[in-house]
Image (tube, grey):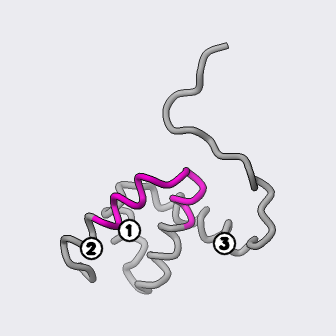
Amino acid sequence: MRPYADHVERHMQALYCSLSEKDRRRYAAVEAEKLGHGGVQYVVELFSCDPHTIHQGSEDIEQLPRDEAEGRVRKKGRPEAS
């Protein structure tokens, strides 16, 4: 499955990398849902993410607009040592 042109995939990947962890999950889930059958596998390969990430993103979306994590954004990388 290659539903998008190369330049669109590059833009999608750039956007995905620029998002917070929570927003990456949600974006991946929406993209997979848009594609229907085979969408999860395509998104897993495109974003190099785990299928669980997509499933968690779908659950997150089902909870909107209520968001228990609103205002909390985890930074990329390792946590700082105390």
Mark 2–mark 3 Cα distance, whole angstroms, equals: 24 Å
Q: Position of residue 7 (x, y in %)?
A: 21, 71
Residue type at mark 3 is Ile
Residue type at mark 2 is Val
Secondary-structure class at tag 3: helix
Which quarter of the image is occupied by the C terminus? top right
Mark 1–mark 3 Cα distance, whole angstroms, equals: 17 Å
Q: Residue at x 52, y 76 (%)?
A: 30
Which residue is identified by label 3? 61
- Which sits in the foreground, 11 or 36? 11
Q: Is residue 79 a member of the stretch shown in magenta?
A: no
Which comes sooner in the sequence, label 1 or label 3?
1
Q: Position of residue 67 (x, y in %)?
A: 77, 62
Q: Residues within 10 Å of mark 2 (few under 14, many from 20)?
A: few
- Asked if the residue at tag 3 contacts the one at tag 1, i.e. Cβ–Cβ closer than 8 Å, the answer is no
Image: 21 above or below 3? above
Secondary-structure class at tag 2: helix
Discs 1/2, front: 2
Q: Residues within 10 Å of mark 3 (few under 14, many from 20)?
A: some
Mark 1–mark 2 Cα distance, whole angstroms, equals: 13 Å
Image: 65 above or below 33? above
Image: 47 above or below 74? below
Which residue is identified by label 2? 8
Q: Residue at x 37, y 80 (%)?
A: 38
Secondary-structure class at tag 1: helix
Which comes sooner in the sequence, label 1 or label 2?
2
Q: Which residues are magenta?
A: 11-26
Identify the disc placed on residue 67.
Answer: none
Decide whether the magenta segment is chiefly helix, strand or loop.
helix
* Residue 6 shown left or right of residue 38 in the figure: left
- Asked if the residue at tag 2 contacts the one at tag 1, i.e. Cβ–Cβ closer than 8 Å, the answer is no
Which residue is identified by label 1? 43
